[in-house]
Image (cartoon, helix red, strand yellow):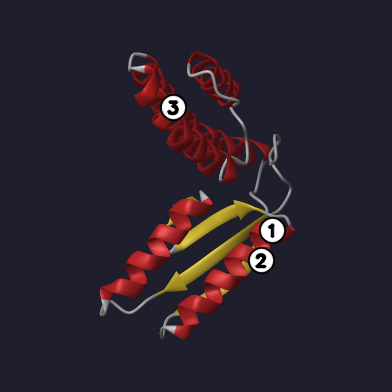
Amino acid sequence: MMSTPPHEWVLLAYRLPREPSTPRIAVWRKLERLGVARLLDSLVALPRDRQTQEQLEWLAEEITDVGGEATIWFAAPGSRAQQRDLAAAMAQRIAEEYRDLMRSIAEARMETPGIRRRALGRLQRELRTIEARDYFPPPERERARRALQQLASAADLPA
């Protein structure tokens, strides 16, 4: 996970046939799981490192395998302000996911111990899923972790 904007980003420009819609939906879902920044229709970006580059290369290959077109690019925004704005937009989007998670944790705290224990595993998985696409961790990340630890303590389970 990165905390400051990178100097370089990996971009995926792609085009998929309208029909069948299944490949388009599958690509959209994979892009969401990766937490990409959507720059334009069919142009997405991630901070460049070995892992993000590999993930977008694999996705580009999947796109071409279903009859689409895909190109990987490496780029840097034209200014530091644009760099910061892109990172801030990604952090803001993920911060909202952490806030949603904290609301779910608060709701689980109000439940019976048995329900709390069952909810804990689901909420831990959700935290890991969010963290996997959190390239610029906002303060909400640590708050969500603490809230989940408190829930685990209330459920008498390890976090």
Measured along the vertical axis of the image, is residue 51 above or below residue 103?
A: below
Name the residue carrying label 3.
117
Residue closest to the eye, 119 or 36: 119
The residue drawn where x is 37% and y is 76% is 16
Left or right: residue 101 compared with residue 137: left
Foreground: disc 2 or disc 3:
3
What's under tag 3, amino acid-wise? Arg
For the N terminus, the quadrant is top right
Disc 1 packing (10 Å; few <14; some 14–19; many ≥20): few
Disc 3 element = helix
Q: Is residue 41 visible?
A: no
Left or right: residue 79 compared with residue 128: right
Name the residue carrying label 2.
54
* Mark seen at residue 22: none
Name the residue carrying label 1.
51
What's under tag 2, amino acid-wise? Glu
The residue drawn where x is 49% and y is 29% is 95
Disc 3 packing (10 Å; few <14; some 14–19; many ≥20): some
- Which of the 4 quarters of the picture holds residue 110? top left
- Which of the 4 quarters of the picture holds residue 100? top left
Question: Could you tell me if the residues under marks 1 and 2 are in contact, i.e. CB atoms within 8 Å?
Answer: yes
Image x and y of residue 77, in percent? 63, 49
